[in-house]
Image (cartoon, rainbow, N blue to C red):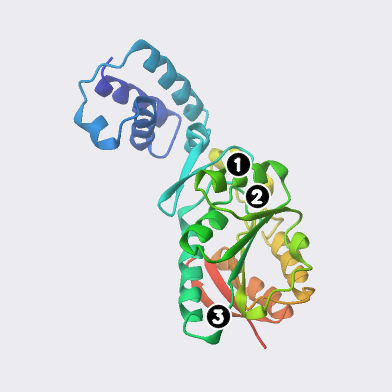
C-alpha cells in the first residue's frame, strides 16, 4: 500500500468517526511512524509502506477513531515552539495559553525599566500539569527562579520529565494551588503568579476528546470558577502578595473573576483574549 492509498482509506475512516481534521491527523501519524517531516511525506505519495509500518499505523488510527486525543497518541504536544511530553494524567497544552508567556515577557520588559530589575524575578506556576508554562517561562527568562505546584503526583512527574527534556531546573512542589508556597516571603515587586486553573463549567463538554483528558484539570463546578474562588481566597491570605497575577478564563467569566480578584485587593490591568493580568491595588 502506498502513502496515497493509506491516506485515502484512513482519511475516510476518521471522517466517518467525525474527527475534526482527518487529513492533518493522518499526516501527523505518518510523519511520526516514518520519522519523516511533512514535506517528505507529501512529496512521496508513491512510497510503499512496509507491513510492519502498516500494523503500527493501524493501531494508531484505531486509537484516533476511538477519539483518543492525537497528543496522547503521540505522547507529545507542541507549545510555544517546543514539544512537551504529555499523557492522560495532564491536560494537553492549548495554543491560547501561549498568551501567558507573551504577557509575562511584557511584564519583565517593563520591569527592566524600573528599580525592580535589580533583584531576581520569581515566577510561580500554580497547577502546572505538564509543566509547559513553567518550563517555557524558565527557557524564555533564564534568570528567573521558577516554582511550579500541582496537587497530582503523576502530573508533577510529567512536569519533571519536561524540565529534564529541556535541560532546565525548576522547583516542583506538591499541594493544592498556593498551599505549598504560602509561607514564601519574596519581595512583592519581584513575584509573578501564573494561574492557568480549570475553568470549564461542568456541563460544557464540547467533544469526546475532552472527556479523555483529566476532568480535574478542566472542569470547575457549575460556573467553572470553583478553583478560582479557592485560589483568590488563598491569595488574600498570603503574607506577601505578588505584584502581578495572570489567569485564564472564558469571556463570560471575566466580571465574576474581577470581583473575586477585587476581594483579594487586585484589579484588572490587561486582558489578552482568554488571559488576564491582575495587579495589586495598593
Task: Say whether residue 4 is visible.
Answer: yes
| Marks 3, 2: nearer the viewer | 3
269 to 74, vertically: above or below: below
Spatial CA distance of label 1 from label 3 is: 42 Å
Residue drawn 47% across and 67% down? 273
Q: Secondary structure at mark 2?
A: helix
Q: Quadrant of residue 61?
A: top left
State left or right for residue 44 relative to residue 168. Answer: left
Q: Which residue is mark 3?
A: 118
Residue 115 position in % (x across, y down): 54, 86
Q: How many marks?
A: 3
Q: Are dots 2 and 1 in contact, CB under 8 Å? A: yes
Determine the secondary structure under disc 3: helix
Q: Residues within 10 Å of mark 1 (few under 14, many from 20)?
A: some
**Residue behind mark 1:** 213
Question: Viewer-proximal residue, 206 or 243?
Answer: 243
The answer to whether residue 248 shows anywhere in this view is no
Identify the residue at horizontal 28%, vertical 14% (top origin): 1
Q: Nearer the viewer, residue 253 or 136?
A: 136
Picture quarter containing residue 173? bottom right
User: Picture coordinates of residue 239 (x, y %)?
Assistant: 78, 76
Q: Residue furthest bottom?
A: 282
- Residue 198 % position (x, y): 64, 55
- Circle 2 is placed at which residue position? 217
Percent across and percent down for residue 230 are 76, 64
Q: Earlier in the sequence, mark 1 or mark 3?
A: 3
Residue drawn 58% across and 42% down? 161
> In the picture provided, is 69 more to the left or to the right than 183?
left
Residues at discs 3 and 2 in contact (Cβ within 8 Å): no
Amino acid at each position: 500500500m502506498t502513502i496515497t492509498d493509506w491516506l485515502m482509506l484512513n482519511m475516510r475512516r476518521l471522517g466517518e468517526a467525525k474527527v475534526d481534521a482527518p487529513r492533518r491527523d493522518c499526516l501527523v501519524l505518518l510523519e511520526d511512524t516514518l520519522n519523516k517531516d511533512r514535506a517528505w511525506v507529501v512529496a512521496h505519495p508513491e512510497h510503499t509502506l512496509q507491513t510492519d509500518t502498516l500494523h503500527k499505523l493501524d493501531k494508531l488510527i484505531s486509537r484516533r477513531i476511538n477519539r483518543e486525543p492525537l497528543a496522547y497518541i503521540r505522547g507529545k504536544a507542541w507549545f510555544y515552539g517546543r514539544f512537551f511530553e504529555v499523557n492522560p494524567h495532564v491536560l494537553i497544552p492549548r495554543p491560547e495559553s501561549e498568551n501567558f508567556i507573551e504577557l509575562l515577557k511584557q511584564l519583565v520588559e517593563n520591569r527592566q525599566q524600573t528599580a525592580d530589575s535589580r533583584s531576581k524575578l520569581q515566577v510561580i506556576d500554580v497547577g502546572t500539569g505538564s509543566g509547559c508554562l513553567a518550563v517555557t517561562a524558565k527557557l524564555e527568562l533564564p534568570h528567573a527562579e521558577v516554582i511550579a505546584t500541582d496537587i497530582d503526583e503523576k502530573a508533577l512527574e510529567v512536569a519533571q520529565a519536561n524540565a529534564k527534556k529541556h535541560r532546565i531546573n525548576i522547583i516542583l512542589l506538591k499541594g493544592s494551588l498556593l498551599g505549598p508556597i504560602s509561607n514564601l516571603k519574596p519581595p512583592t515587586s519581584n513575584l509573578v503568579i501564573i494561574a492557568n486553573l480549570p475553568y470549564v463549567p461542568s456541563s460544557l463538554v464540547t467533544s469526546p476528546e475532552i472527556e479523555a483528558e483529566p476532568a480535574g484539570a478542566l472542569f470547575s463546578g457549575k460556573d467553572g470558577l470553583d478553583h478560582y474562588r479557592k485560589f483568590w481566597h488563598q491569595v488574600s491570605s498570603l503574607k506577601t502578595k505578588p505584584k502581578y497575577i495572570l489567569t485564564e478564563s472564558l469571556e463570560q467569566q471575566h466580571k465574576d473573576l474581577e470581583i473575586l480578584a477585587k476581594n483579594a485587593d487586585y484589579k484588572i490591568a490587561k486582558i489578552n483574549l482568554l488571559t488576564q493580568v491582575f495587579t495589586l491595588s495598593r
